[in-house]
Image (cartoon, helix red, strand yellow):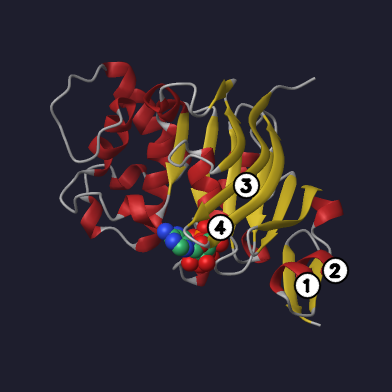
Amino acid sequence: MTAAVAELAGVTVTRGQAVLLDDIDLRIDEDQRWVVIGPNGAGKTTMLQLLAAQLYPSDGIVGLLGEVVGAVDVFELRPRIGLTSSALAERIPAGEKVRDLVVSAAYAIVGRWREEYDEFDFERADELLAQFRIDHLADRTFGTLSEGERKRVQIARALMTDPELLLLDEPAGGLDLAGREALVGALADLFTDPAAPATVLVTHHVEEIPDGVTHCLLLNGGRVVAAGPLRDTLTSQNLSAAFDAPLQVTYDGRWSARGA
Ligand SMILES: Nc1ncnc2c1ncn2[C@@H]1O[C@H](COP(=O)(O)OP(=O)(O)OP(=O)(O)O)[C@@H](O)[C@H]1O
């Protein structure tokens, strides 16, 4: 049996009168790659914040990497979890060099360059840059990169600490078609690697589901519409329920969806 990297039991998140997540049960195993899909405001980012140990539930239990959030120091948990999001990208100084940015993740530092890094760290950073086909950008500054290049740098950085759980919040958001396709391809390479960590990828678009994704969570209004193995879960009926609109899902090696 595989081990759970994350377990949510009866998890509710409220802010004032607003219910952001409502009574969520979910288990993510170490060999699983999840995609979370839902309309704006469904609670996807809130879910990732819970999984990143950046948010406590208002009710219920969040188990992460064998620990219960709230009963353990989150600063011990966070280095074991890789996260990319546009909010984090905004905090990256434009003048930071790509290689430094990736290598400094080993020490969970953004925009500082004070620690000693060893040869192994630089080798690992270069390996990750090559894996995401951005090794030619190693000496460029973050601010000079295209949006697609920035996304890949962030993912390389998130992997630098060899996280046990990788969380990607709309990694293809804002990319043009070619950039999106390149990123989806790079993620497919990662997701189909058995050594890659358990992953949760948030998106609005089924076209952005890379090969290697095994499970799907559909959210609407903070509630689970459906969750389980991808092929069983991502049906026209479930997607329509998640988006409150008649949608037709097809799969021909890639997922796509259109109005029914
Ligand atoms: N502090 C808060 N107080 C009240 N409501 C909030 C607060 N933070 C978030 N919300 C609401 O919670 C809901 C879920 O937000 P969340 O960012 O998790 O959704 P999402 O699915 O990631 O949306 P999107 O696709 O637009 O990024 C939204 O309706 C949002 O307006």
Residue at figure coordinates x 71%, y 40% from the top left: 26
| Callout 4: CB less than 8 Å from ligand 1 | yes
* Picture mark count: 4
User: Is residue 197 found left or right of 144 in the rendered image?
Assistant: right
Q: Which mark is residue 240?
A: 1
**Camera-nearest residue between 162 and 203:** 203
Q: Earlier in the sequence, mark 3 or mark 1?
A: 3
Under circle 2, the secondary element is helix
Which residue is denoted by mark 4 in the rendering? 20
- Whole-percent x and y of residue 8? 65, 37
Q: Marks 1 and 2: in contact by CB < 8 Å?
A: yes
Q: Position of residue 64 (x, y in %)?
A: 57, 28
| Whole-number angstrom distance, CA of label 4 to CA of label 1 | 20 Å
Q: Can residue 166 be spotted in the picture?
A: yes
Q: Marks 3 and 4: CB-CB under 8 Å?
A: no
Q: CA distance from mark 2 to mark 3?
A: 26 Å
Q: Position of residue 231 (x, y in %)?
A: 83, 53
- Crowding at label 1, few (<14), some or many (≥20) Cα neighbours within 10 Å? some
> Quick check: 210 left or right of 178?
right
- The residue at which mark 2 appears reads as 237
Taking depth in this image into account, of 16 and 54 the one nearest to the observer is 16
- Mark 3 or 1, closer to the camera: 1
Q: Earlier in the sequence, mark 2 or mark 3?
A: 3
Of the numbered discs 4 and 1, the one sitting upstream in the chain is 4
Judging from the image, what secondary structure is the residue with disc 4 in? strand
How many angstroms separate mark 3 from mark 4 (CA)? 30 Å
Residue at mark 3: 188
**Relative to residue 78, is residue 189 depicted above or below?**
below
Which amino acid does the dot numbered 3 rest on? Ala
Residue in the picture at 32% in, 22% down = 121
Q: Residue furthest front?
A: 17
